[in-house]
Amino acid sequence: MEVAKPIIRKIDDNPEALKIFEQDLCSCSDENVQEIITSYPTVYIHNWKESDEYEVYIGESNNVIQRTRQHYETGFYNANSWQKRIAGKSAVLYIIGHEHFNKA
């Protein structure tokens, strides 16, 4: 039995890049990719440089686009949040999906 390869996307970590990612996903000809990213549990990693070290926030969601939007919308109002700290930095967002990801 051959295991499918994971779907891994790396985008800039900001609302504009997320919107472009969503548009690209909607126009993607591979319906399997669309379904896995939009319907299966998906892992996402926000990654940014803080001083001389890198920081990460790792999450999981069945709707990664909606959940990431929520992070952007709510986090920017809290001065101590990680969302506020990534603003203006070269942060990246990794989105990882796989057909075998599921919730038990």
Image (cartoon, rainbow, N blue to C red):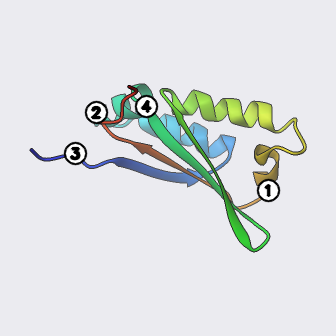
For numbered disc 1, what is the local secondary structure?
Answer: loop
4 or 1: mark nearer the eye: 4
Residue ID for mark 3 = 4
For residue 44, side relative to residue 8 (left or right): right
- What residue is shown with label 1? 88
74 relative to 16, above or below: above
Between discs 2 and 4, the one toward the N terminus: 2
Quarter of the rendering containing residue 102: top left
Could you tell me residue 33's position as x and y percent? 33, 37
Residue at left 43%, top 36%? 25
Q: Amino acid at mark 3?
A: Ala
- The residue carrying mark 4 is 41
- The picture places residue 90, in percent across and down from the top left corner, at 69, 61
* Depth order, front residue of 35/101: 101
Residue 74 horizontal side relative to residue 100, left or right: right
Using residue 20 as the reference point, say whether residue 48 is left or right of it. Answer: right
Q: Are marks 4 and 3 in contact (CB under 8 Å)?
A: no
Question: Is tag 1's residue or tag 2's residue first in the polypeptide sequence?
Answer: 2
Quadrant of the image occupied by residue 15: top right
Residue 68 x/y as whole percent: 62, 35
The amino acid type, in three-letter code, at marker 1 is Gly
- The secondary element bearing badge 4 is classed as loop
* Earlier residue among tags 4 and 1: 4
Q: Where is residue 46 drawn, in percent x and y?
A: 62, 50
- Alpha carbons under labels 1 and 2: distance apart: 34 Å
**Residue topped by disc 2:** 32
